[in-house]
Amino acid sequence: MRIYPAKPVKVYFYATCLVDLFDPQAGLDAITLLEQQGIEVIFIEKQTCCGQPAYSSGYDQEAKIIAQSQMDLFTENWPVIVLSGSCGGMMHYHYRRLFKDDQNQTQVDDFCERVFELTEFLVNVCRIKLKDQGENTSVVMHTSCAARREMNVHVTSTQLLSQLDNVKIREQDYESECCGFGGTFAVRHSDISQAMVEDKTRHLSETKASNFVSADWGCLLNINGSLEYQGNPMRGRHLASFLLERTGGK
Amino acid sequence: MSQANNGVQIEDLAPEHFHDQAKAALADPQLRQNFRGAMDYLTDKRKIAFSDPTEEKRIRDLSAAIRQRSLSKLPDLLEQLETNCTNNGIQVHWAETTEQANSIIAGIAGQHNAKNIIKGKSMVSEEIELNHEMEKLGIECLESDMGEYIVQLDGDKPSHIIMPAIHKNKQEVSDTFEKHLDDFTPTVDVDELIKTGRTRLRKKFHDADIGLSGVNFAVAETGTLCLVENEGNGRMCTTVPNVHIAITGIEKVVEFLSDVPPLYSALTRSATGQAITTYFNMISSPRRAGELDGPEEVHLVLLDNGRTQAFADEEMRQTLQCIRCGACMNHCPVYTRIGGHAYGTTYPGPIGQIISPHMMGLDNTKDLVTASSLCGACGEVCPVNIPIPEMLQRLRQEAKNSPKNNRPAIKGQAAAASRIELLAMKGFAFAASHPSLYHLGSWSATKMRSLMPSKIGPWTQCRTAPKPAGKTLHQLIKARKQGQKS
């Protein structure tokens, strides 16, 4: 169990490269949610990518170069809020492994301890109370495997959704099963990945939920791409955007 | 020779052909349905067996601690096991390679002029391809575990370490029996199918020259071999024939007899959701004077076959904690879809992906270590807390890079090294650590979004190409700040 700090005055915001490039609005929406909590959000312009693609492909040296360059940007002792469970897992958990035998281990540990995924931060640090202002609707959520098994933040994502009075949460079959993305796995083992994502889209569709959300853009890139390819009109969007919309923030 | 997975010949199955084997399995709807059904059944059973999370954690932590302690003293415990087994009258043999193991077993068979061996379940005997090697010497090996028996009738291989014939449904088992057994009336009544197998095997136990089994736990303290099973065939194999040969990997040793109950509980709950199995055998010696049954001779073959390589590296040593429950397979989304044969290794699924490189070299298994989305389901259920995703990660790294100074080399090290990929990763690392370059890249992507190709390699075989947004978050935030200022 993680011990959470008191609500800070300022936080760093880590958007992740996928949000930066494919869904910048999700980034802005998450910032707004944090600002609504009375927190000043600092966005370091020099941030890029957490290095996960190199790390999960076996290129530890290259991943370390990227990891070091990112850690160097967040010098103040403020929490770093990450907009993805998977990148959060990389920065909170795998950075420690990456620098295991290095001299700057303590510096790395300090950084990793400051990394929080958005939903865990909103629930466990901000103790956010959401007021649903939307019509009755239903939602199905997909949580990334890293969010679920490394960060344990599938719980906090659900807690946020369940605060919305007019939103009915629908559960898909095989909810905890991977969508088949896994970074380079999707292209290195495209046939297996295809079987996995097609099952995932079917299970999501079968819930007939009006909304599909996820807090991880990696999974969304995979699942949305497959839905569109199949001509299925369902599309997933970032949980942050959904939450802000429901609470009347936009 | 028979066929499995849409025309892939069983004897050709090899980890080097993983892509083709996986593809063939994915294209077989019956196979996929069989695996999904069986895995769902097993995962549900495990869930019920571990319905109390506190209890689950307690058992897993305890089991992991026992295995880690045993491994930390492995060389000493193996010697102690040998001493105590020898004192008990069990003859101990050491085999570094699969060839040595086969030659030891062939030697014992030769001494007794044995012509037939009846086997209980043993994955290590699959690992050394015992049946095949003995056949060359004119010795018949008959599988007596029901699943193994079905698989053997078909000239097939096990597709799971606990349930070897799980890739077949009852209709397919009936078809197998009909094809190979005289006077068999086709049926999908499971009890009837099992009865058929049992009846045919019964006489064979009596006539066999040698009984061969695996070992689940070898207790150093007492020189006891523990065997976990449900069918009673294991007990028959180890008591009826005059000679019993047990074969095991060197990692299966535990320090104390009291280490066994927690591991047994973790094993059965994780494997089949059982609190205990129908049979639990403890073999501590050959037949003693005055005893009514039991073999005259008991042999123990201890096999290395790459295990010391895993042992030599403290991180990868965790691989050897495995108690062969198969839970990682049952919960793996990749295994569930392609089944065990696709891996082309004795041990399939997640544990197979991390143990096989030590047995067969990274050069042969480099595709296996990438065949995981690192979803973590395997690590989440492992009853002895092996961090399988971390091991996969580590092996991916070893497959790409030459050995580091402070680490022993791995067989087949750097087999997946690729100059082009390395250059691409170096380029990526350079761009990601030089913000101006990264911004130039992402800015260009937004500007050229309409020119993005609609086909991008394997990604678009089942997905549309992703389209960058019109502006990056970096750009939007800049604009937002300027807006706030003005």
Image (spheres, coloured by chain):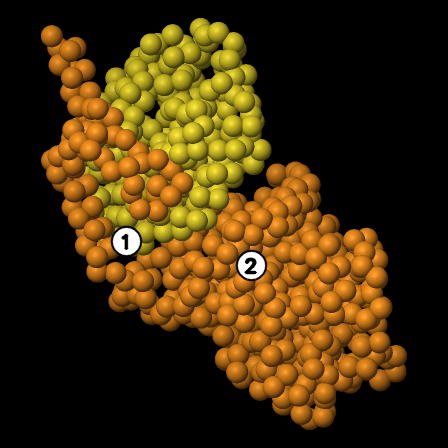
Label 2 marks a residue whose chain is: B
Q: Based on the displayed image, in which of its 4 quarters is residue B152 positioned? A: bottom right
Q: How crowded is mark 2: few (under 14 residues within 10 Å), some or many (20 or more)?
A: many
Which residue appears at 69% of the width and 41% of the height? B48
Residue type of the residue flagged with mark 2:
Asn
Residue A11 seen in the figure: no
Q: Mark 1 points at which residue?
A: A59
Secondary structure beneath dot 1 equals loop
Quadrant that contains the C terminus of chain A: top left
Label 2–label 1 contact, CB within 8 A: no
Label 1 marks a residue whose chain is: A
Q: How far separated are the C-alphas under marks 2 and 1?
A: 34 Å
Q: Based on the displayed image, in which of its 4 quarters is residue B104 positioned? A: bottom right
Which residue appears at 45% of the width and 7% of the height? A134
Residue B333 in the figure: left or right of residue B2: left
Q: Position of residue B438 (x, y in %)?
A: 16, 37
Q: Judging from the image, what is the letter of the chain drawn in orange?
A: B
User: What number is the disc on residue B5?
Assistant: 2
Q: Where is residue B485 in the image (x, y as percent from the top left)?
A: 13, 10
Q: Judging from the image, what is the letter of the chain drawn in yellow?
A: A
Residue A76 in the figure: left or right of residue B200: left
Which residue appears at 35% of the width and 9% of the height? A249
Residue type of the residue flagged with mark 1:
Tyr
Q: Which of marks 2 and 1 is in front?
A: 2
**Can marks 2 and 1 be said to lie on one chain?**
no
